[in-house]
Every structure is written in C-alpha cells, then in structure tokens.
Image (spheres, rainbow, N blue to C red):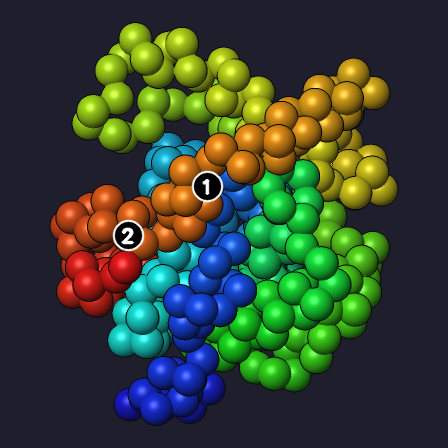
C-alpha cells in the first residue's frame, strides 16, 4: 500500500531539482562534503536520533558505510531524477519505520517522529549552506531562499510535511536556533562519532594505496574534526563538552580562505560533483539491492 504521506509520481516529478536550478548547481560542490561530520553531530545530538543510532546503526564498525549512505542519499535526491528520488524516499521511510525502541531514560522513541525526522533532513541543508560560507562560494539572501525552497520540496519525497519545517529561510534559521537551544543534548553517540572522525579507518576505495592513505589520514582527519567542531555554535559546543581553541579557529579560517580562493581555478566538475559521484557509486549501490537504504540503482545509472 502506498505511504499516504509521500507524493504520487506526478508530484514527485515536480519536486526534484532541474539542472538549471540553484540547488542542482550548488549542492554538489566537493568542498561542502567536509561538513558531513557537522551535520551528523547535529543529528545525533537529538535524543531520538541518538537512540536510534545507538541501537540500530553500525556506524562505529562501518563509519565509511554510514558516510557513503548519507552522500548517496543527498546526491540521489538532488541529481538522480524523479524516479530514483521517489524510490529512495519510499525506501528511507520504510527503513525508518522499523527503527523504534526505548531510550536509556525510559522514553519510547520512533525514527519517524516528525520532529526528529524533519531535523535530520534540515541538518543536511544547513551543512551545505555552512559549507559554502566557510569553504566555497557564500550564498546571498535570495540564493539561500531558493536553496531552502528546493530542499523543502525534496523533504516531501521522504515524508517531511510542509508543516514540519518553516516556510522561509528566516524561519528556518530561527528553527535551527530553537532546536539547538531546546532539544539537542550531550550523549555518548555524539562522542562516538567524534572519536571515529578523529581516528578514521582506511576508506573502502580499491584504488587508494595504503601508503597514500597513511600520508593523507592525519590532515584529512584534522580537517574533518576542525570543520565538525568549529562549525557548531559555541553554546552547543559547551553543552557537548567540546573544546575549540582560538588557534583552532584561526586554523579553520585559514583553511576556509584557501579553499574559497581556489574557486576561480577549481575544475567545474568538482563544483558540481553530484552526477560524477553517482556514476562512481553505481556499482556499490547496485551491489546491495536488498538494503532499504540503497537508492534505485537503475535510475542512478542514468544520472548526469
């Protein structure tokens, strides 16, 4: 039976971004991928999300799998086309329908609680916008409104209702502030995520030599940790018991300036890496067709 909160095929086709849209052009900048850890920490600081991850996720033993599934989701929704995006939304809700239980404080939780489910979707756009602000091409006020409108449309494909997120960007910023101030809390999952980022395992990329990874591991993990902790509002860092020194802030700013300065010479393919990413991931996704977290592989094959 179709999920009543999901749009039909005709509506889905109108919700996905087109190649001439701002969301298509800006969501796939390779530089914003460094904010993936920031989004993840915001997500797992929500008590419902933390409970679900604690009991139902294997992120601690397969952190790269978790990262790639998140990137798969974002890139399929933006670049995979209506069929792939709608199928991904359906499978995502189906998977989350089974994620439920009792949190350590005795509260019952369900991954499809509207507030928690919408928050996960919201953090991904916040990470994209913050990523451009720090490392890419900062968005103007009109552009953030366009990006946000497109992201709300994509939310409909996973069952985030229009009433679950504010109507405009100004309301969204107030919503994020309220969630940070009233809902997010310190927990063991937050610190587990940060521990994994600080000591990353070798990524499962066949053509990556062990020697190259040993050289890249330290600067890679340092950049990810700096971006993850440094982008968090200071009041949330304090609540999560995370230190961030003045020297670290200056280092993050310097890295951001260097990244932004590279924009004029950055290959166009890296500024819109989404279609290329989907072609690269096609076989990995097709290799786990029974996984409800997997996007629709045939549609991915046509992306870009």
Q: Nearer the viewer, residue 158 or 1?
A: 158
Where's residue 275, x and y in %? 31, 54
Q: Secondary structure at mark 1?
A: helix
Residue at image point 18% right, 59% down = 301
Where's residue 13, x and y in %? 36, 83
Q: Nearer the viewer, residue 234 or 59?
A: 234
Q: Quadrant of residue 79?
A: bottom left
Residue at image point 52% right, 77% down = 153
Residue 145 appears left or right of 30? right
Q: Is residue 109 visible?
A: no
Q: Which residue is mark 1?
A: 30
Where's residue 231, x and y in %? 70, 39
Residue 125 appears left or right of 231? left
Separation (CA) of disc 1 from disc 2: 13 Å
- Crowding near pointer 1: few (<14 within 10 Å), some, many (20+)? some
- Crowding near pointer 2: few (<14 within 10 Å), some, many (20+)? many
Q: Nearer the viewer, residue 139 or 126?
A: 139
Q: Which residue is mark 2?
A: 278
């Amino acid at each position: 039976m179709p999920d009543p909160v999901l749009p039909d095929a005709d509506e889905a086709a109108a919700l996905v971004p087109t190649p001439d849209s701002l969301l298509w052009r800006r969501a796939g900048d390779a530089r914003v991928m460094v904010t993936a850890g920031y989004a993840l920490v915001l997500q797992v600081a929500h008590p419902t999300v933390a409970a679900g991850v604690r009991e139902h996720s294997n992120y601690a033993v397969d952190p790269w799998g978790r990262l790639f599934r998140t990137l798969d989701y974002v890139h399929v929704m933006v670049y995979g086309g209506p069929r792939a995006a709608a199928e991904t939304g359906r499978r995502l809700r189906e998977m989350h329908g089974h994620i439920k239980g009792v949190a350590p404080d005795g509260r019952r939780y369900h991954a499809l609680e509207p507030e928690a489910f919408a928050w996960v979707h919201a953090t991904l756009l916040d990470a994209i916008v913050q990523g451009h602000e720090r490392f890419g091409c900062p968005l103007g006020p009109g552009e953030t409104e366009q990006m946000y409108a497109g992201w709300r449309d994509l939310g409909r494909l996973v069952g985030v209702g229009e009433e679950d997120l504010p109507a405009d960007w100004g309301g969204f910023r107030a919503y994020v502030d309220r969630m940070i101030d009233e809902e997010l809390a310190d927990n063991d999952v937050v610190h587990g995520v940060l521990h994994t980022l600080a000591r990353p395992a070798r990524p499962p990329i066949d053509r990556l030599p062990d020697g190259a990874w040993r050289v890249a591991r330290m600067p890679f993990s340092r950049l990810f940790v700096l971006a993850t902790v440094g982008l968090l509002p200071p009041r949330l860092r304090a609540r999560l018991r995370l230190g961030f020194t003045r020297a670290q802030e200056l280092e993050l700013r310097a890295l951001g300036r260097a990244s932004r300065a590279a924009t004029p010479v950055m290959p166009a393919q890296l500024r819109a890496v989404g279609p290329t990413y989907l072609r690269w991931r096609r076989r990995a996704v097709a290799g786990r067709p029974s996984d409800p977290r997997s996007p629709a592989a045939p549609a991915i094959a046509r992306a870009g």
